[in-house]
Amino acid sequence: MVVAAALSITLGAPSANAAAVTVQAESYAAQSGVGLEATADTDGGQNAAFLAEGDWMRFDQVDLGAAGRLTVSARIASATGSGSIELRTGSLTGPLLAVLQTSPTGGWQNWVTRSADVTTHPTGPQTVFAVLHSSTPGDFVNINWFSFVSGGDGPAPGWVDVDQAKWEAQLTQFRAMTPAAVPGNAVRVPEFNATCTYSHSKPDDPIVAPGLPGASHMHSFFGNRSTDASTTAQSLLANTATSCTPAKDLSAYWVPTLYERGKAVEPDGVIVYYGSRLPDPTATVPFPQGFRMIAGNAKSQVPTPAGSPNQFFCAGPGGETGRSADGNWPLCAPTAKLVHQLVFPDCWDGKHLDSPDHKSHVAYTYDGKCSGAYPIAIPSVSFVISYPTSGSSDGFTLSSGMASSIHGDFFNAWDNAALGQRVKDCIVQSAKCNSAGTF
């Protein structure tokens, strides 16, 4: 089954003269080595799973449209391993249409979209083969769907290119910085942080729904106090009020609002950690100005019993004492608080400030390095969010739904010099720094 779709959410709205087609991965006409499983998204359907080196799928009558630009995408998930998806026409060894790189996304149901632009391609209905390649032993990727957006003009929708001249100037400034001397008693951990408090709430999302006030579920914002639906990189730098220390971090951070018995519970503290999970963090560079990304999946609506990945947990004396009636939330001792840690990707493609799903320009470290389509090591960002509640048997809800839908957004607006010096002093030298950027 081949389904036509507007793809306005996944890829951004195609231009008026573009044609968009979505092919569900489970709709293959033939396959080798492919299994199917339910996709853990609302309305997610099935996905092609357990895909390994040499597996393949055949799709018939895929309309590649007219001559001109073709954007080919796949929605993928991976817990481990890197590889590629070769799309070929006519046969398993037929002409190469596109190659989509894969890398770990943080889990087998943590979905991102990988895309490639094609300038020359067959037109009209075609037989398309998806051929899987990886040097990783065993399974390395799941695929939810493919999309083919043909025609149109201008850049591929949803991708925001980095200004290479400005980025090179920022890198030159960073490389010229002299690292501070590390004292002998420093903790040798590559890390600095921004210490933040809750700022405000709005049903806005300037990354997912820019320029559309009220178009999102409720978000709790910390960092730049001006953040709303109309926020841009320029507006963040122009508005210097922030709920974070240091004051030179004008970035915007946000998460879905937490509710307890219908009442919003706002964070009583947030620490944004910037670190490295690489064995050798010396190649880490700062974020380019205006960089943005998302971690987590707002559409994930699955149970989270004790022991589930990426759980909310209890911090403080007594810790967790039980679970909510539905099993999805921890009950904390009266002396403990509800906490969540959200970890972002730490490898970058070096080309884009943003991507259609706000994840495809970044990837999680695999095998201790950043390589392939994501060669640039960026600081590993994580939010540690503390809520002033111990919970109850009624549990909680998020504005995005169940506990599994927890997600976070980061929109960089650090002062370049302040960020660069911290990366140079603290991450590159593997020395733990405080929010002032000192040891």
Image: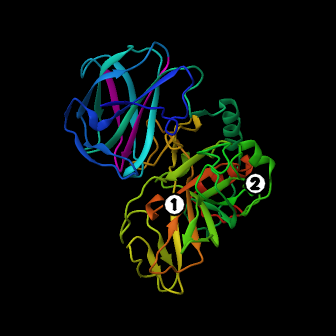
- Measuring from the top left, give residue 435's x and y in whole percent: 68, 64
Is residue 8 found left or right of 3 in the rendered image? right
Q: Mark 2 falls on what kind of element? A: loop
Is residue 139 found left or right of 290 in the rendered image? left
Q: What label does residue 342 carry, if any?
A: 1
Is residue 131 found left or right of 424 in the rendered image? left
Quick one: 293 or 138, which is closer to the camera?
A: 293
Return the residue at label 2.
226
Kindly identify the amino acid type of the residue bearing the numbered disc 1. Answer: Leu
Is residue 300 found left or right of 213 in the rendered image? left
Quick one: 151 or 355, which is closer to the camera?
A: 151
| CA distance for labels 1 and 2 | 23 Å
Q: Earlier in the sequence, mark 1 or mark 2?
A: 2
- Measuring from the top left, give residue 306's x and y in whole percent: 36, 72
**Magenta stretch: residue 73 in it?**
yes
- 10 Å crowding of disc 1: few (<14), some (14-19), many (20+): some
- Measuring from the top left, give residue 58's x and y in whole percent: 25, 27
- Measuring from the top left, give residue 411's x and y in whole percent: 64, 49
State the image quarter where residue 199 is shown.
bottom right
Q: Please say if the residues under marks 1 and 2 sit with CB atoms less than 8 Å apart.
A: no
Picture residue at 62% right of the left edge, 50% below the top: 205
- What range is drawn magenta here? 69-88
Kindly identify the amino acid type of the residue bearing the numbered disc 2. Answer: Ser
Q: Mark 1 falls on what kind of element? A: strand
